[in-house]
Image (cartoon, grey):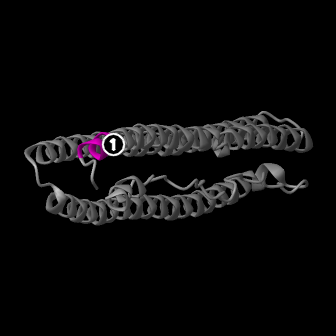
């Protein structure tokens, strides 16, 4: 009897989501184009066009990498969900077998009543734990999805700011050229503006790369699941001890 009852305790399984992190994408930073010194005013449009092409290519690279990461994340979460459901199915089958074995040993009305109470307690504990685990998993996915969305928006905003600053720099350069400013000075101001915009872009993207929030979400989910499992095990052990007392000869 003791051996059979111990099975229930051994079946208490902790479903933890392994730590994972977003892969680092290629930095979406456009390198300022060095406009030709001698004919800056006549070549600035071509220089700006090359810059636009470069940033466009980097945006495409980033979008492709982001889509791959999203797909990998979705597959990871889907597999965890499938594994959790399969584990529950296996656990339920094992639990039913234990109940059947205990039922064969219950002879007196007191023993049968004790077994019914035991089954009720365990079934309720299982359901409570599963609800807690599912809630933790859903909360994790919801917050991760929001984190990913915020990340995409931050990158889009940073890129748009860079494009706007680059466009403003081009307009200013053409205005300076049309106003008779020396080409060397117009070129220097133009490149300085692009460098400033580029440094700002780097800083913003560096902040987006920080995955500290993701680690916090993973830790919170693991803590929630661990607590649910701890409470489940405590309930099982207590129910097991109570059932043993109802089978003094077992």
Instruction: Please provide percent x and percent y for residue 70.
Output: 47, 58
Instruction: Please provide percent x and percent y for residue 73.
Output: 47, 58
Q: Residue at x 8, y 45 (%)?
A: 109
Q: Is residue 142 visible?
A: no
Outermost residue to the left: 109
Q: Quadrant of the N terminus?
A: bottom left
Q: Residue at x 71, y 51 (%)?
A: 29
Q: Which residue is mark 1?
A: 129
Q: Is residue 177 visible?
A: yes
Place residue 173 in its image quadrant: top right
Place residue 94 in its image quadrant: bottom left
Q: Is residue 148 above or below residue 62?
A: above
Q: Nearer the viewer, residue 158 or 114?
A: 114
- Direction from residue 154 to residue 237 in the image, left or right: left
Magenta part mainly helix, strand or loop?
A: helix
Q: Tell whether position 245 is magenta.
A: yes
């Amino acid at each position: 009897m003791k051996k059979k009852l111990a099975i229930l305790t051994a079946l208490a399984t902790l479903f933890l989501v392994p730590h994972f992190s977003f892969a680092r994408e290629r930095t979406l930073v456009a390198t300022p184009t060095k406009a030709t010194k001698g004919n800056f005013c006549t070549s600035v449009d071509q220089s700006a066009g090359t810059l636009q092409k470069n940033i466009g290519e980097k945006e495409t690279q980033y979008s492709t990498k982001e889509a791959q990461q999203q797909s990998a994340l979705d597959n990871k979460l889907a597999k965890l969900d499938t594994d959790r459901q399969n584990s529950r199915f296996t656990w339920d089958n094992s639990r039913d077998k234990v109940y059947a074995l205990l039922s064969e040993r219950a002879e007196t009305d007191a023993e049968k009543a004790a077994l019914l109470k035991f089954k009720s307690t365990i079934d309720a504990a299982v359901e409570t734990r599963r609800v807690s685990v599912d809630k933790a998993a859903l909360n994790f996915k919801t917050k991760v999805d929001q984190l990913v969305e915020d990340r995409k928006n931050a990158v889009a905003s940073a890129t748009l700011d860079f494009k706007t600053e680059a466009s403003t720099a081009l307009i200013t350069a053409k205005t300076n050229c049309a106003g008779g400013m020396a080409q060397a000075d117009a070129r220097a101001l133009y490149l300085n503006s692009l460098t400033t915009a580029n440094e700002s872009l780097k800083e913003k993207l560096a902040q987006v790369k920080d995955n500290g929030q993701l680690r916090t979400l993973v830790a919170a989910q693991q803590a929630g699941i661990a607590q649910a499992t701890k409470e489940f095990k405590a309930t099982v052990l207590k129910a097991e001890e109570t059932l043993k007392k109802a089978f003094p000869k077992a």
